[in-house]
């Protein structure tokens, strides 16, 4: 269980910024084997196996194995001990690898075996240790089966852990204890999707919506080329109590990406470009930070999440008012590459948006009006032929429909609040990557076309089966059991191939998933940011169809418990109001080269951060020693830490975020 927060116990509590569940491995001697495109470490004694991520090294020592990242700033050490006490076994391993290790334990968390399909374990724990200022993250994991404890010791610099999170997940999720059997549903026959099963599914929906405080949800299921289920639950607005329906429009966020790649596949069919066409052949001035890659990156690379270009969302969120499609493409020239090309999964909204815009240019669009031309092309090639009459990129059209949902998000302490719809407009420049409005009836038509291998619900050929199937092909691993394709995530769920993609905006979330072998798909739309409901429903439907125990609920409960712990700590430590004379810095305008200008002001007893695109209240918390830290309290960016100080010249500065998402703003004169 890896806490990749900042170096100190900051505003968001003991779990830091981005909680990564990184569950790793165990062994003593050597044995490397190649399976497909993965290097697998095989225990010669037959105890376990573990994948070695691309360009990592496996270095056996006398009593343990070390896995090291390419730069050497992440180390995972793996040991197997005989013990009936998991915690004691973990302590004993430290004496083996680092005699004298004395960091205090910060948290011990019991992990549900279902987290990585490790049913049958007797105990599964994660231990985190107090982090020294700017020191590495130190954590441990113990998996006990009878009297054998598989221990994983994790040591990583914060930035390195953030940059190589996907590779850590590959190690985590790919660890296999040989004595544990893996559930395989590939030859099992699913139950029919009948009224009885759907009634049980609906009961679960109601239960989870109540537990997760979801205002509203809309769900559609397709099978055999038809819409077989569509229903709304809850409300689209908490104040008006207007019901959510299958016709209600919501933003689908990054679920838009696969629709952009479907459009690109059509253009490949027609010879407008090939997947391997260099981007510079279409846009000669195209640049990324690496000059060689600027020449060689091709159209497929823009949407594969495999180039090493990282996620840098703040750089468009803070500049959305002035961003054009052309500016999004140009922004890539300054992006640092976290990893080598093809080495690790790196999710970038700017890359995918650029892919959609450059495809539009290849199809006859004009540089200077690529956004408008993309919308026209998308409507002509996707929305119109699929009969997606309600779907739109236009906020005005969504509102004019009279049946659209209100977005909701949470304060840093967890309470739900309504967001103004104008906040969502910052997504507009990212159109191809995540700004579509739709409803589950329209999304059902899209799912049917995917399952029909390019044939629309009316039977017309929209895209070739060959090029559509290429969008489903794995391009780079996300974990041991999931890879990114071209706008899709391809997952192995207990032997079943599941193709999916979720989406999140500031106050909406979505889930699209389908199983080609079952000719089954589901669309879920909610008006709650980052709603855990979506994946819960997707997995529960599969569990019902295959008569599996509700294992995902165990994973969900762990997530909820950790979030509640962090939020509870914040509620207890929160300073409810900052007095004007207690402000940690001078008010006024600050600037950062990447994020532009922000303004700090004090109004009606509140300390406010204004980015121009949106505002967020700043609150303070005090820890047990009386140390004060600050962070954003209200959405759309609730929970981000802020530090106030001075530069070497005594000029006030504000540090926003931490690690790879750290930005320093200097006060303007």
Image: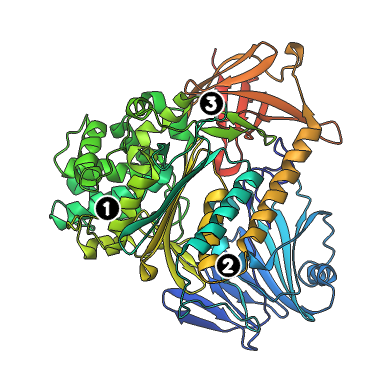
Earlier sequence position, callout 3 versus callout 1: 3
Q: Earlier in the sequence, mark 1 or mark 2?
A: 2
Q: Are marks 3 and 1 in contact (CB under 8 Å)?
A: no
Assign the C terminus to one quadrant of the image. top right
Dot 1: element: helix
Judged by depth in the image, the label closer to the viewer, 3 or 2, is 3
Is mark 3 in CB contact (under 8 Å) with mark 2? Answer: no
Residue furthest front in the image: 195
The x and y percentages for residue 189 are 46, 77
* Residue at left offset 20%, top offset 33%: 367
User: Is residue 302 visible from the viewing direction of this image?
Assistant: no
Residue pointed to by mark 1: 262
Image point 40% across, 31% down: which residue? Answer: 403
Q: Residues within 10 Å of mark 2 (few under 14, many from 20)?
A: many
Q: Which residue is mark 3?
A: 240
Secondary structure at numbered mark 2:
helix
In the image, 232 versus 351, the foreground residue is: 232
Query: Can you identify the residue that label 2 sits on?
Result: 173
């Amino acid at each position: 269980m890896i806490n990749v927060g900042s170096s100190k116990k900051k505003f968001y509590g003991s779990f830091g910024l981005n909680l990564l569940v990184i569950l790793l491995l165990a062994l003593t001697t050597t044995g490397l084997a190649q399976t497909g495109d993965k290097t697998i470490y095989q225990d010669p004694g037959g105890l376990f196996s573990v994948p070695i991520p691309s360009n990592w090294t496996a270095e056996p020592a006398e009593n343990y194995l070390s896995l090291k990242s390419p730069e050497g700033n992440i180390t995972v050490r793996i040991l197997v001990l005989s013990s009936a006490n998991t915690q004691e076994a973990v302590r004993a391993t430290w004496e083996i690898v680092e005699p004298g290790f004395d960091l205090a334990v910060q948290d011990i968390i019991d992990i549900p075996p279902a987290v990585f399909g490790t049913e049958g374990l007797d105990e599964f724990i994660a231990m985190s240790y107090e982090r020294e200022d700017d020191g590495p993250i130190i954590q441990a994991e113990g998996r006990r089966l009878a009297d054998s404890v598989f221990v994983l010791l994790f040591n990583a610099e914060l930035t390195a852990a953030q940059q190589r999170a996907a590779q850590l997940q590959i190690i985590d999720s790919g660890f296999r204890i040989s004595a544990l059997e893996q559930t395989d549903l590939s030859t099992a026959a699913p139950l029919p999707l009948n009224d009885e099963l759907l009634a049980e599914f609906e009961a679960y929906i109601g239960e989870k919506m109540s537990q997760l405080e979801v205002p509203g949800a809309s769900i559609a299921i397709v099978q055999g080329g038809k819409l077989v289920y569509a229903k709304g639950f809850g409300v689209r607005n908490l104040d008006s109590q207007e019901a959510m329906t299958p016709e209600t429009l919501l933003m689908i966020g990054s679920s838009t990406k696969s629709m952009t790649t479907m459009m690109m596949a059509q253009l490949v069919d027609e010879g407008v470009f090939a997947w391997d066409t260099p981007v510079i052949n279409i846009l000669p001035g195209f640049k990324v930070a690496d000059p060689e890659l600027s020449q060689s990156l091709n159209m497929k690379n823009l949407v594969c999440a495999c180039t090493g270009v990282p996620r840098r969302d703040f750089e468009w969120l803070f500049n959305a008012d002035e961003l054009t499609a052309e500016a999004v493409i140009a922004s890539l020239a300054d992006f640092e590459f976290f990893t080598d090309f093809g080495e690790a999964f790196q999710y970038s909204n700017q890359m995918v948006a650029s892919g959609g815009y450059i495809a539009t240019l290849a199809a006859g669009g004009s540089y200077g009006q690529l956004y408008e031309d993309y919308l026209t092309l998308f409507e002509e090639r996707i929305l119109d032929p699929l009969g997606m009459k309600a779907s739109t990129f236009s906020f005005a059209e969504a509102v004019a429909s009279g049946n659209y949902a209100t977005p909701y998000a949470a304060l840093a302490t967890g309470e739900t609040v309504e967001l103004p719809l104008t906040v969502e407009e910052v997504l507009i420049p990212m159109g191809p990557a995540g700004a579509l409005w739709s409803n589950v009836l329209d999304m059902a038509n899209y799912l049917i076309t995917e399952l029909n291998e390019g044939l629309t619900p009316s039977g017309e050929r929209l895209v070739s089966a060959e090029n559509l199937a290429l969008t489903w092909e794995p391009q780079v691993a996300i974990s041991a059991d999931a890879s990114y394709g071209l706008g899709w995530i391809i997952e192995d769920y207990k032997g079943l191939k599941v193709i999916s993609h979720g989406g999140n905006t500031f106050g909406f979330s979505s889930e699209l998933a389908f199983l080609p072998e079952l000719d089954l798909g589901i669309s879920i739309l909610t008006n709650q940011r980052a709603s855990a409901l979506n994946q819960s429903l997707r997995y529960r439907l599969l569990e019902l169809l295959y008569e599996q125990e509700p294992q995902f609920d165990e994973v969900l409960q762990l997530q909820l418990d950790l979030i509640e712990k962090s939020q509870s700590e914040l509620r207890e430590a929160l300073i409810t109001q900052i007095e004007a004379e207690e402000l940690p810095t001078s008010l006024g305008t600050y600037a950062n080269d990447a994020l532009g200008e922000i303004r700090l002001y004090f109004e009606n007893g509140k300390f406010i951060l204004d980015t121009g695109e949106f505002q967020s209240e700043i609150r303070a918390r005090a820890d047990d020693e009386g140390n004060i830290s600050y962070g954003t309290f209200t959405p759309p960016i609730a929970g981000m830490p802020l530090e106030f100080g001075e530069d070497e010249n005594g000029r006030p500065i504000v540090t926003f975020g931490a690690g790879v998402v750290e930005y320093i703003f200097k006060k303007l004169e």
